[in-house]
Image (spheres, rainbow, N blue to C red):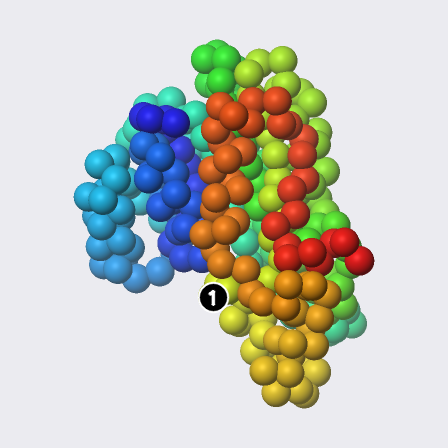
Amino acid sequence: MQNRNAVVTGSTSGIGLATVRELAGRGCHVVVNGFGDRAEIDRTCAEIAELSGTRIVYSGADLSRPEEARALMAEAADLLGPIDILVNNAGIQHVAALHEFPDDKWDLLLAVNLSAAFHTIKAAVPAMRERGWGRIVNTASVLGMVGAPHKPAYVAAKHGIIGLTKSVSIEVAGHGITCNAVCPGTVLTPIIERQIAQQAQVTGLPEDQVLKAVFLEKMPTGRLIGPEEVAAAIAFLCSDAAASITGAILPVDGGYTTH
């Protein structure tokens, strides 16, 4: 993976940031994307670049806007050169009962969690086909494989990501490109911390009870997953060793989907 060029969306924290660290550690140059304090993001990028000896650059593209998702891929190619690896990890969440779920939140979650991946993949594939090599990994969720209450937009979008992954994998399979999805269970990330708080508000339970009853109840391992564990799975799918793995939906879920 030395000197491969990668884009990782939603990578200023959580699984995305862990993936940037993992790919950089394997020799990739990476475009970081997401929101947060710019000074802190710049420090993190500089730290990863120094440790890995690779180029780590930042784009603040807002992936809820299709034109910015497309611009991100063009900017990444300008900054690093042709993009070899695309990890669609950007995601947001909103928790509410169906009859109270805001229409604008539905539209926003589908835009970020599903449509953005379509736009980045569409932009990345032509150059990957020309070079005969490419890796696309989409971060879905166990909630792309099963349902859950109070999360209609998130569940719908993550099911859509799995369908998009399978469809793309078939189209690009003859061009040296793979497209796979990982389905994390409950990962210790800022978005999960916010979900725990939101679920506590919806259910009226204390947060520690919500964690055990809602987020860990179906995970036989009984523990939160580390972001680096998901990042390692993503990095493997981006490697030459995974050349014959495409259209795969890989749970990294502590046994959640074995039920």
Instruction: Name the residue located 30 percent from the left edge and 62 percent from the top edge.
Output: 37
- The quarter of the displayed image where residue 14 is located: bottom left
Please determine whether, in this image, residue 27 is positioned above or below residue 199: above
- For residue 15, say whether it is visible: no
Element under disc 1:
helix
Instruction: Name the residue located 43 percent from the left edge and 41 percent from the top edge.
Output: 8
Q: Position of residue 43 (x, y in %)?
A: 22, 54
The residue that mark 1 highlights is 190
Instruction: Name the residue located 43 percent from the left edge and 25 percent from the top edge.
Output: 84
Q: Position of residue 31 (x, y in %)?
A: 35, 39
Q: Nearer the viewer, residue 124 or 214?
A: 214
- The quarter of the displayed image where residue 73 is located: top left
Please determine whether, in this image, residue 220 is positioned above or below residue 51: below
Residue kind at label 1, given as amino acid type:
Pro
Left or right: 101, with 135 as reference point: right
Please determine whether, in this image, residue 159 is positioned above or below residue 241: below
Left or right: 134, with 156 as reference point: left
Q: Position of residue 1 (x, y in %)?
A: 39, 27
Q: Nearer the viewer, residue 110 or 6?
A: 6
Q: Nearer the viewer, residue 23 or 16?
A: 23
Badge 1: few (under 14), some or many (20 or more) residues near its Cα, within 10 Å? few
Q: The C terminus is located in which quarter? A: bottom right
**Number of numbered discs on residues:** 1
